Amino acid sequence: MANEGELESEFPSGVMRMLTAAEARGLDVEVRPRPAANSLEEAAAILGIRPADIAKTIVVRRASDAYLFAVVPGDTQVAWPKLRAQVGVNKLKFPDAAEALAATGYERGTITPIGSEPEWPVLIDQRLVGCRVAMGAGAHGFSAFLDIDDLVRSFDAVVADLVD
């Protein structure tokens, strides 16, 4: 692996933040540069994987200034009643792009729980358990590949049925 100075010139600051946090958590993350994509399906095609092999990280507001991450397969949508039941609240909100950036330090389309500032609770859909996935890497034009089981352990994430 390249030394930190070499990495800084190779990756944007968001990717560096994610990689630094991954190393601190003992996560083995492979970052792959890729052309910009206009959709998750396009990103999957560029990477040569199925949309289901991309884990979307959804930022959800559960209260004023309190958020969580829902990590779900790329070919699914969050089932809000299931997520609300899992969290134990009656109301959750999907923040706009500016609020998501303020809550995580990452732009929409690049969001990952790894290196989020501050850290928020992580819930992971059970369909991802046992999978190696691509996910946001902290900057556009990059994907992070990792084993979901490592992410679950590293974040003490809740694994549940979160999608329809």
Image: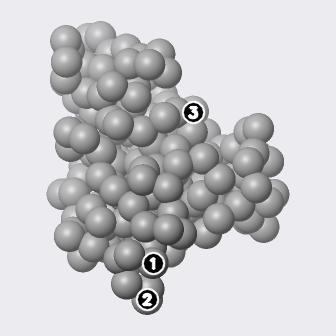
First reached walking from the N terminus: tag 2 or tag 1: 2
Frontmost residue, 84 versus 63: 63
Label 1 SS:
helix
Q: Residue at x 48, y 35 (%)?
A: 107
3D distance between C-alphas at marks 2 and 1: 9 Å
Q: Is residue 92 left or right of residue 47?
A: left
Rendered location of residue 18, percent (x, y): 36, 58
Q: Is residue 83 left or right of residue 142?
A: left
Q: Are marks 3 and 1 in contact (CB under 8 Å)?
A: no
Observer-side mark, 3 or 1, equals 1
Label 2 SS:
loop
Rendered location of residue 14, percent (x, y): 42, 50
Frontmost residue, 134 versus 72: 134
Relative vertical location of residue 110 with respect to residue 21 in this rendering, above or below:
above
State the image quarter where residue 2 is shown: bottom left
- Which mark is drawn over residue 1? 2
